């Protein structure tokens, strides 16, 4: 059922900050909420303690006390779990609370990473980068033809979404067809231009497509608003 479990109380919940402010208010304010959280820590109920402290942090992110306490509890939970994924989430949350958000030391959009992806995966990687609102008014179709693989990839940008199909023949609706090798495709996606790529149609469509692709950043908040 996706995010919805069927309980109507979960249909239209407040967003995290607004919800946290109301929880803290209902508990009697920040000091009272933190005090109750400490009580659950003493009782060993760390799972509910982090629930209360998370509300405290989202309600008043400038307060250092709740953040320090929440980081300590996250660390205790990390030590107690054998699941590596859970442990890393707990420790990453504790680090953010103590040190703030930091950019990752490695990048996933490297040339060697892109070279290992299939054409389908390269298009999927592009599709999640489309700025939907900016692309809403665009309706364009571009064919990628890779003779070495003997297939056409029919890209369609419409209603702010980039989709594609694969076929053995060119699409009659494509306003631009690019004939290229995998290496040339990688160079194109790396921003090195068309180069020796053979084009048929309106090359301005390619510029329009690339103009609505955004570069995501990995330095985003996880446990703070």
Image (cartoon, rainbow, N blue to C red):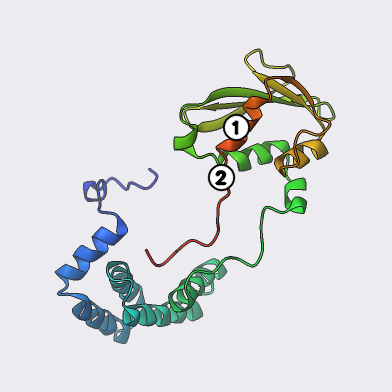
Which part of the image, by quadrant, shows the N terminus? Answer: top left
Where does residue 212 sit, x and y in percent of width and height?
Answer: 55, 37
User: What element does badge 2 sit on?
Assistant: loop
Residue lying farthest to the bottom in this orientation: 42
Residue found at x 50% / y 33%: 135
Could you tell which of marks 1 and 2 lies nearer the N-terminus?
1
Answer above or below: position of 98 versus 172: below
In this rendering, does residue 165 appear at all? no
Answer above or below: position of 185 versus 15: above
In this rendering, does residue 88 appear at all? yes
User: What element does badge 1 sit on?
Assistant: helix
Locate residue 22 relative to residue 151 in the image: left or right: left
Q: Nearer the viewer, residue 165 or 7?
A: 165
10 Å neighbourhood of mark 2: few (<14), some, or many (≥20)? few
Using the image, tell me which numbered label, if any, was put on residue 209.
Answer: 1
Locate residue 39 relative to residue 215 in the image: left or right: left
Where does residue 148 sit, x and y in percent of width and height?
Answer: 85, 30
Where does residue 224 sit, x and y in percent of width and height?
Answer: 39, 67
10 Å neighbourhood of mark 1: few (<14), some, or many (≥20)? many
Q: How many marks?
A: 2
Residue found at x 57% / y 40%: 213
Residue found at x 45% / y 63%: 221
Answer above or below: position of 152 versus 108: above
Using the image, tell me which numbered label, if any, was put on residue 68.
Answer: none
Answer above or below: position of 112 versus 88: above
What's the distance in space between the residues labelled 1 and 2, CA to CA? 11 Å
The residue where tag 2 is placed is: 214
Residue lying farthest to the top in this orientation: 172
Q: Nearer the viewer, residue 137 or 53?
A: 137
Which part of the image, by quadrant, shows the C terminus? Answer: bottom left
Q: Are marks 1 and 2 in contact (CB under 8 Å)?
A: no
Where does residue 31 sit, x and y in percent of width and height?
Answer: 21, 81
């Amino acid at each position: 059922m996706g995010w919805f479990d069927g309980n109507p109380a979960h249909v239209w919940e407040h967003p995290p900050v607004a919800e946290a402010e109301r929880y803290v208010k209902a508990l009697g304010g920040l000091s009272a909420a933190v005090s109750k959280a400490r009580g659950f820590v003493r009782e060993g109920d760390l799972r509910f303690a982090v629930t209360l402290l998370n509300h405290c942090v989202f309600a008043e992110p400038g307060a250092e006390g709740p953040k320090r306490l929440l980081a300590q509890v996250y660390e205790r939970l990390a030590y107690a779990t054998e699941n590596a994924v859970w442990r890393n989430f707990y420790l990453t949350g504790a680090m953010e609370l103590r040190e703030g958000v930091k950019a990752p030391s490695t990048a996933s959009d490297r040339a060697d990473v892109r070279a290992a992806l299939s054409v389908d995966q390269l298009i999927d990687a592009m599709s999640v980068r489309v700025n939907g609102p900016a692309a809403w008014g665009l309706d364009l179709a571009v064919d990628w033809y890779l003779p070495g693989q003997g297939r056409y990839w029919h890209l369609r940008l419409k209603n702010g979404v980039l989709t594609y199909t694969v076929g053995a023949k060119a699409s009659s609706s494509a306003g631009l067809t690019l004939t290229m090798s995998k290496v040339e495709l990688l160079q194109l996606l790396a921003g090195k231009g068309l180069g020796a790529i053979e084009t048929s149609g309106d090359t301005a469509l390619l510029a329009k497509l690339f103009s609505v692709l955004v570069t995501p950043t990995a330095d985003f908040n996880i446990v703070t608003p």
